[in-house]
Amino acid sequence: MRVCVVGAGAVGGLVGGRLAAAGHDTAALARGATLEALRTHGWRVGDEPAQPVRAADDPAALGPHDLVVLAVKATALPDVAQATADLLAPDGVVLTAMNGVPWWFLDGDPLTSVDPGGRLRALLPREQVLGGVVHLSARSPEPGVVRPVAGDRLVVGEAAGGRSARAGAVARALAGAGFTAHESADVRSEVWYKLWGNLTFNPISMLTGATADQVIDDPQVHALCVQVMVEAARVGDLVGCPVTEDPEARMDVARQLGAFKTSMLVDAEAGRPVELDALVTAVHEIGLRVGVPTPATDGLLGLTRLAARNRGLHPW
């Protein structure tokens, strides 16, 4: 399989490096220090041998690909959407490895929160997309270097739902590269379930600077998290993504991970734009669309958005 990674950071670098080690022809669309590191050293994952990669900052220099792994932050997606489309072979497919609600999530009008004007949908229509859900963590201590941290599970499925030969082939390729990967006939529900867990911890940690265990252990904040999760579960029911787990059970899972910083807190501390719209604004917008009141979610959104804007981490 001919594969290109767009977003060769921690997750993208891990996927690209392991697919290369499994014998796939891999490329990376990158720039700056990451581009130079990949050109000089190839993929570097943990203590594994370095793997070759074709790296460039111009899609035309890389050619068409069977699979494009889109592993950027949601805030960066508008800047790379055209390049991603340009990297696809005529029968190629995009695999999204991103947090939050993606542009392809709903039928009907595009979500303003994640795809204003429908530009992403026009460039990357649902028919060319496989949804991906990442249940692993990795870090990139320097450009072009990846250190796996925990987990190895990846879920792949047709954005439009159902099973397909191409989704199965991508899942098998990822499994052959050492991931615990499987195809889902309902990847939208998998996306919503992961969002359901991130929806509270990420914005609250960004607001407060608290680690996840501190969020869970504060009684009033804990109660707010439960209220937001109940609202999101009601929204999920009406868009065909039911959540059957109890919020307290999900909190218990997070508690076992200890004192970790969420990705939104890490981004905020580094002065990078935060993925507020894909993680929270989209839930508010979908709630309006399906007629589910979300007062706790809306309050959390307003506070976090104001804090992010005043720190230059979210556009006005």
Image (spheres, rainbow, N blue to C red):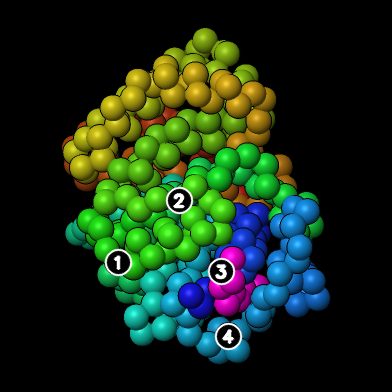
Residue 24 within the segment the image draws in magenta: yes
Q: Is residue 243 above or below residue 99?
A: above
Q: Which mark is residue 62?
A: 4
Q: What kind of residue is marked 3?
A: Val
Tell which of 175 and 124 is nearer to you: 175
Q: Residue at x 62, y 61 (%)?
A: 18
Give the SS element for disc 2. strand
Give the SS element for disc 3. strand
> Does residue 112 show up?
no
Mark 2 crowd level (few <14, some 14–19, many ≥20, 10 Å Cα) = many
Q: Residue at x 33, y 25 (%)?
A: 245
> Does residue 63 show up?
yes
Q: Is residue 210 left or right of residue 38?
A: left
Give the SS element for disc 4. helix
Magenta segment boundaries in residue numbering: 22-32
Instruction: Name the residue that disc number 1 marks.
Output: 165
Q: Is residue 171 left or right of residue 261?
A: left
Residue 35 location, x and y as percent?
A: 72, 74
Q: What kind of residue is marked 1?
A: Ala
Q: Nearer the viewer, mark 3 or mark 1?
A: 1
Give the SS element for disc 1. helix
Instruction: Name the residue that disc number 3 marks.
Output: 6
Residue 278 location, x and y as percent?
A: 44, 49
Q: Residue at x 37, y 37 (%)?
A: 193
Tell which of 9 and 74 is nearer to you: 9
